[in-house]
Amino acid sequence: MAPAASTPAAAAAAVALLVRAAETRAEESHAVIEALVGLEKTMRAEAKADAKLSGATLDALDGAWRLCFTTGTVDTQKKIGKINYFPLKAVQTFDTTTEPMAITNGIYVGDVALVRFFGPFEFNEGTRKLTFDFDEISLLGLRIPLPKGGAAQIGAASGLGSKSNVARAKRELPAFFNWISANEDIATARGGGGGLALWRRDLEAQERMRE
């Protein structure tokens, strides 16, 4: 088990455990959650001390990421408990080279996208909050515009998103992640619904994204 990430050595141990969890899906769930919570605490303190860290996190975030582990939103935890290792192939991409920056979120069977959401995102380097709003959906390749708040309603109904996003959409507030970290291997964040998540970089999806 990784120690609570309150020192550089402990943070490095937490990251190493999370990398193993993302690669093997064999680390114990409670150890992964402990590593995520500890890393969140450490990175929050380090970002306050080093203003350049948030920009470096955004630079590293550019690319494609497969969701490996999530505690689920608070709503989901109340219903069915923590999800932990995510059973489906869910891939998100973040393109920081466009204006506005662009995010996608998709559920796949193999390399075939069953459903994908598309939209812009913004990143606040002061708070490391990433806000986004999906304005299009693709069903088996057919792209359809979404009404304001439509993605939030679909996410809440399917369990992939938080009910809090629906309430935020009604107040014309975007969904968000509070970003913890991103490097060449893994990314971590706390969602607007309160859940923690771990992704691993998906090089194949990233190559398709670059195309």
Image: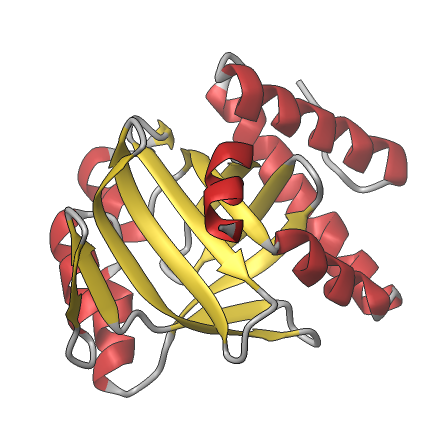
For this orientation, the residue located farthest to the front is 211
* Residue 5 picture quarter: top right
Residue placed most toward the observer, 36 or 78: 36
* Residue 56 picture quarter: bottom right
Which residue corresponds to the image point at 70% horizontal and 59% vertical from the top-left?
59
- Whole-percent x, y for residue 24 in the image: 53, 14
Q: For the image shown, how many numbered marks are present on the structure?
A: 0
- Whole-percent x, y for residue 78 in the image: 24, 44
- Horizontally, residue 114 falls left or right of residue 128, namely left
Quarter of the figure with the N terminus: top right
* Residue 10 picture quarter: top right
The answer, for residue 128, to whether it is visible in the render is: yes
- Horizontally, residue 202 falls left or right of residue 106, namely right
The answer, for residue 3, to whether it is visible in the render is: no
- Horizontally, residue 117 falls left or right of residue 91, namely left
Which residue corresponds to the image point at 47% horizontal and 72% vertical from the top-left?
121
- Horizontally, residue 209 falls left or right of residue 171, namely right
70 versus 164 height, above or below: above
For this orientation, the residue located farthest to the bottom is 171
- Whole-percent x, y for residue 164 in the image: 27, 67
The type of colouring in the image is: secondary structure
- Whole-percent x, y for residue 36 in the image: 60, 39
Which residue corresponds to the image point at 77% horizontal and 27% vertical from the top-left?
13
Which residue corresponds to the image point at 84% horizontal and 71% vertical from the top-left?
51
